[in-house]
Image (cartoon, grey):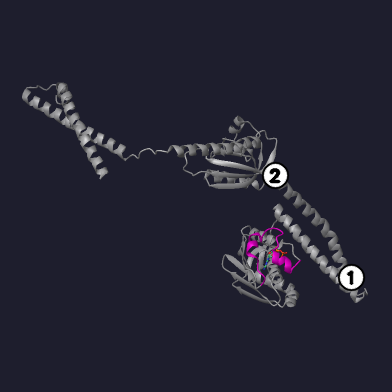
Amino acid sequence: MQHGKKQKRLFSNAAWVAIIFFFGSTLLLWLFSDQLAIMFLYIPGQNISDLVLFGRAKVILVAILSILFALVSYVLVLKYSLMTVHRPPPPVIPQEAFSDLMLSREQFRKLYENSPVPYFSIDSVGNIRNPNTAALRFLGGTLEECISTNFYSLLIDEGDSSQGMSLLKAKVERSVPISQEEMRITTINRKKDRYALVSIYSLAHNSSVAFRHLVTLVDVSKERENEQVKTDFLLLASHQLRTPLTTIKWHIDYLLSSDSIEMPDLVREYLEQIYIGNERMIELITTLLTVSRIEMGVLAPQYEEVEVNKVVQDILAELSADIKKRKTEVVVTTEGDDVLTTDYTMLRIIIHNLLTNAIKYTSNGGKVTIESMFSPHSCTIAVSDTGYGIPIDEQEKIFTKMFRATNARKVSANGTGLGLYMSRAFTEKLGGSMTFYSEEEKGTTFTITLPRVAPEA
Ligand code: ADP
């Protein structure tokens, strides 16, 4: 109602302006009517014989022009008024809210400035702006030096992290909301290199602010160093231990298999026990070596055609004594052509590990099922058991290195917590994935999906 009234008033206002314009312009045009008539009506060389006719034409011209002016003024006034009427009034911020806003702004500024975490912003090509004090310290430069430096020029391109760098740049260009990479980064004077977790938070793509990518840096050099020391130690220790253990194995093997050596039954029994213990140590060291290789990123799969069912049967034959002792029922089902192009050793370790776990973590007389399904592009192998299961609150840590669930530690003291970590790393290396479902006291199913042909093959 109110709106309709307003609009009516606008139309009548515009009409009044148009009327005033009409009379005003008529008056003005009439004053200059002779000149106008000569300009528009007179053709040079023409003889103005009929003055009455000329006078009438002059009146018509003035009338037409006045009406035209009035119409134009009407339209313009109306358009302008409508525009101002429809424009929303500027928001009125209450004084209290305004003070709150200023306070939060001040708080944010103080936090940003004094935070121990280095913060700064970059534009889409990496130019730095607004570094806080911690950022100036981290980058080792003054404010002027920092803002005249390109952030990307401080990142060091090295081996596997070069891919991380181009990935990071591409993500910033596309304004992916959050990007994180661990990178080596140098100071502005190039005197100190560190490893940092670089996190970039980008504001919306259509934002008009150029420096809209917020960068934070976390120094992770210490963690990297510790990891490296651990890996080096593992590698060295494993190499040094493997040789004497292999020599022991060799000698016991000789003693046990030689017919020419006479020994009492008790000694033979002890030797067999030593042999089993030694085998376990060799297995553990091989696992530790493999884990170090995974961490160093130097795993190189050897691709070949592998028959999955044959691998499963071989492992079951190897575990038959244990299966028999525990009275475990084993069911194998398979569907489709079972040949994969993959790494034989890795696949064997994965399946071996899942099967030994299923047997180990199931009480005597339980059931273990191995189901393999093959489709044209992938293969799924599921190993299920009716065992103890994994406690729900410990499930998220199950692929963590050296993690063993509380119930598993109670039923079996033997275990390293490295098998699943290694198996998942292998599965991913071969282009696949590993998942599991488990219910305590009911059982567990580990499922791996692998491509028919490994992507790197
Ligand atoms: P390990 O068996 O040597 O302890 P793994 O890495 O193979 O190490 O397994 C890690 C942990 O995962 C085990 O200690 C156990 O708690 C849990 N786990 C693995 N498989 C099963 C399973 N089939 N049933 C119940 N728990 C399992």
Q: Position of residue 310 (x, y in %)?
A: 68, 72
Name the side, left or right, on which 100 lies relative to 166.
left
Q: Is mark 2 within 8 Å of ligand 1?
A: no
Amino acid type of the residue tagged 1 in the rendering: Leu
Task: Say which of marks 1 and 2 sits in front.
Answer: 2
> Which of pointers 1 and 2 lies earlier in the amino acid sequence?
2
Give me the residue at 12% from left, 26% from top.
58
Q: Quadrant of residue 389?
A: bottom right
- Can residue 352 be found in the magenta stretch? no
- As drawn, the label of residue 221 is 2
Q: Quadrant of residue 358?
A: bottom right
Looking at the rendered image, the quarter that the N terminus falls into is top left
Position of 125 relative to 448 (above/below): above
Q: CA distance from mark 1 to mark 2?
A: 51 Å
Q: Position of residue 61 (x, y in %)?
A: 14, 28
Looking at the rendered image, the quarter that the C terminus falls into is bottom right
Q: Which residue is mark 1?
A: 255
Give me the residue at 81% from left, 66% from top.
279
Give me the residue at 75% from left, 60% from top.
287
Position of 45 relative to 6 (above/below): above
Residue 334 appearing in the image: yes
Give me the residue at 35% from left, 38% from top.
89
**What's drawn in magenta, residue-wise?**
387-413
Name the side, left or right, on which 36 lies relative to 245.
left
- How many neighbours does mark 2 have within 10 angstroms: few (below 14), some (14-19), or many (20 or more)? some
Between 92 and 82, the residue placed more toward the observer is 92
Quadrant location, ligand no. 1: bottom right
